[in-house]
Amino acid sequence: MASASQKAKIPSSACCRNDSSGSIVRRQASAAGAQPENAVQDWIVSSRRDDQYASKTDISSLISPVERLPDASPKLPAAKPVMPVMLRAQSSHPLDPLSAAEISVAVATVRAAGATPEVRDGMRFIEVVLLEPEKHVVALADAYFFPPFQPSLLPRLKGGPIIPTKLPPRRARLVVYNKMSNETSVWIVELSEVHAATRGGNHRGKVVSSELVPDVQPPMDAAEYAECEAAVKEYPAFREAMKKRGVDDMDLVMVDAWCVGYHSEADAPNRRLAKPLIFCRTDSDNPMDNGYARPVEGMHILVDMQNMKIIEFEDRKLVPLPTADPLRNYTPGETRGGVDRSDIKALQIVQPEGPSFRVSGHFVEWQKWNFRIGFTPREGLVIHSIAYTDGSRGRRPVAHRLSFVEMVVPYGDPNDPHYRKNAFDAGEDGLGKNAHSLKKGCDCLGYIKYFDAHFTNFTGGVETIENCVCLHEEDHGMLWKHQDWRTGLAEVRRSRRLTVSFICTVANYEYGFFWHFYQDGKIEAEVKLTGILSLGALQPGEVRKYGTIIAPGLYAPVHQHFFVARMNMAVDCRPGEAYNQVAEVNVKVEAPGENNMHNNAFYAEETVLRSESQATRDCNALSARHWIVSSLTLAPIFCVTGK
């Protein structure tokens, strides 16, 4: 069972779309998305070319059937079978996130492929991410090269067992924005082990393809945000408008660049535009001063993000700044004239014998669960190859891939500037790129395993977020209990869960994403929202219908957070099989009559959803609606519900 704290549907009028590779871009539209030591022993007959790749290659091209000699052949050696020899050590699983070295090679390859020095100088690297291979390549790796070392994942071929010779080279997918030409392109670069190990930069990958994508704008980068803030602060008309509000020190001013959205043809993505929101701190020497508690209203600003120029500015209405109040800061209480709680005692979480989970690279095993941890700049945490070891039935696949691919935050206040707040925080900013290093403060307790994350910055350099993903166990209260009233005897089982999580900050909000694995076979997805509200300022005595007043002159516009989870299910499926179906379950009340003579009958009705359009459904608590993903050949083992 998997449940999410938030469920989302992106409105059809949204200005962003998912392309086939999963990246969000703004589309022009109408103004109205190792070989193991115990590996199979035999002779390798042949090898395959390095440039054969999974996306277009049948599994038979990556493996070779064992050639067996006749029993009476005098050439058959009497010794034990020989261990196969790898042509190349396999150091990275096909689903491992790109290493820092691989990112560097991919960037250098694309930059070198630029037609002119001007093109190369204009390249800005929005995203460099692993191009995930086909499922049969993952199965090949899991069968012979990496844990769980399960050859039964592969289809059986005529002629006996199959032996792999090597895995195909890994590939990177790059989204590149050219600042000079205002063009966006998508590149595919092939890597290899020697490339990935390169430190001196003398080796390059191979460009497989490049495509110019017209009429789109890729996500904005932190470097652009900083440049936008500087450009706005230097604009004379803006400085004059701030003086009218009593602010001369530009170090107090905060400029948050928001995507322009798509409200008319003037917002079309042939230009890279932003409409910033303005806030003001009260103390430039206090880095923890909460500037979001003092929104600056009444200004209209339009910024050309390509050339970093202010192309529209209008001071439409003078709204007084909310009164400075140190209690609105988020520093310890004694620094704000208050007192923090002191009546809570210490709570120690210890595991003297260590954790119950086992980790090999990015492969995790815990309480019959096993899966791989991935990470992308846009989605953040990705869970790959989830399976459950079910007694004599062995390792049963559950899902190929789980992640949150998008989220949207629509604001319900029709007043300027709040009507245009409609943030796609994954597609426009990137949840992964905005992730925290948990070295700076971690909410995980007990024995913790951390995973780092590597990204490219705007100019193509590699940045590493250390301790980005947290893996740990948690006590989760009571799992099961029963007491016999006749004997007075009771039995109770405590619940333990394994949690994989990361936290990111997008402007004022923090989002914590958690995937929980339970001992009873349940998977739960949870999103926690924290941080600071995006606020608005009010005129003296003004009241807003579309928000909540939280302090004098300060209100929080009504808004929602929708999260889009992508679940690539593979319940009891081998690679390439499509034997899953989705059924919706609703509680029905039996009509009075022969089958319901006492008017108490109700039952669960199951309806198979046979198309994507039919499966466009809403939650319904009144009918206890939920969905079951099951194998067509075996009993259902996975249920999806929404809170």
Image (tube, helix red, strand yellow):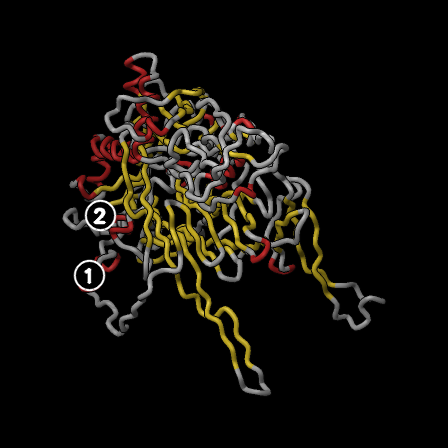
What distance separates the C-alpha of mark 1 from that of mark 2? 15 Å
Amino acid type assigned to the residue bearing label 1 in the image:
Arg
Residue at image x 85%, y 67%?
594
Residue at image x 35%, y 33%?
220
To which quarter of the image does residue 180 belong?
A: top left
Per the rendering, the mark at residue 356 is none
In screen coordinates, is 210 left or right of 9?
left
Disc 2 marks which residue?
281
Q: Can residue 112 be seen at all in this image of the molecule?
A: yes
Amino acid type assigned to the residue bearing label 2 in the image:
Arg
In screen coordinates, is 22 left or right of 177?
right
Disc 1 marks which residue?
336
Query: Quick check: 31 above or below 392?
Result: above
Between discs 1 and 2, the one toward the N terminus: 2
Residue at image x 50%, y 41%?
143
Q: Where's residue 83, x and y in %? A: 45, 37
As drawn, the residue found furthest toward the top would be: 116
Regarding mark 2 in the picture, which secondary structure is present there? Answer: loop
Quadrant into which the N terminus falls = bottom right
Regarding mark 1 in the picture, which secondary structure is present there? Answer: helix
In screen coordinates, is 230 left or right of 626?
left
Q: Where's residue 610, x and y in %? A: 68, 42
Residue at image x 32%, y 38%?
454
As drawn, the residue found furthest toward the right would be: 594
Query: Quick check: 449 above or below 430?
Result: below
Q: Where's residue 518, x and y in %? A: 48, 60
